[in-house]
Amino acid sequence: MDSMTIIAVASIVTAGITLAIGVLGPSLGEGRAVATALTSLAQQPDAAPSITRTLFVGLAMIESTAIYCFVVAMILVFANPFWNHFAAAAGQ
């Protein structure tokens, strides 16, 4: 197996692990945030606009973590910064 194949396999495996771990945390966080917001809405229905607005801002911030993991995985698969280094080393 040549070095380019090893880099390709390592990139794909790392991208998969990045997505698996990087999406697990935000998913659990979003579920907990929604459950807490629903509990708060049940206890204080008059504060619904404030709770809902705060919930959506918090969910957007939590979701950005999963989006960053997705971007890192796409960079590893399609625009890997190690390709040029190993291609230049193989050519020398």
Image: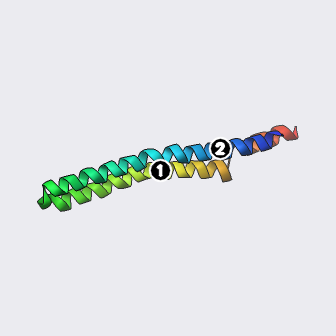
Mark 1 and mark 2: Cα distance apart in space: 18 Å
Q: Which mark is residue 20?
A: none
Three-letter amino acid code at disc 2? Val
Q: Position of residue 34 (x, y in %)?
A: 30, 54
Q: Quadrant of residue 89?
A: top right
The local crowd at label 1, few if under 14, some if 14 to 19, many if 20 or more residues have their Cα within 10 Å, is: many
> Does residue 60 appear left or right of residue 80 in this picture?
left
**Among numbered discs 1 and 2, the one appearing first in the sequence:** 2
- Discs 1/2, front: 2
Q: Quadrant of the C terminus?
A: top right
Q: Identify the secondary structure beneath mark 2.
A: helix
User: Does residue 81 lie above or below 55 as drawn?
Assistant: above
**Residue on which disc 1 sits:** 66
Q: Quadrant of residue 85?
A: top right
**Residue on which disc 2 sits:** 13
Viewer-proximal residue among 73 and 28: 28
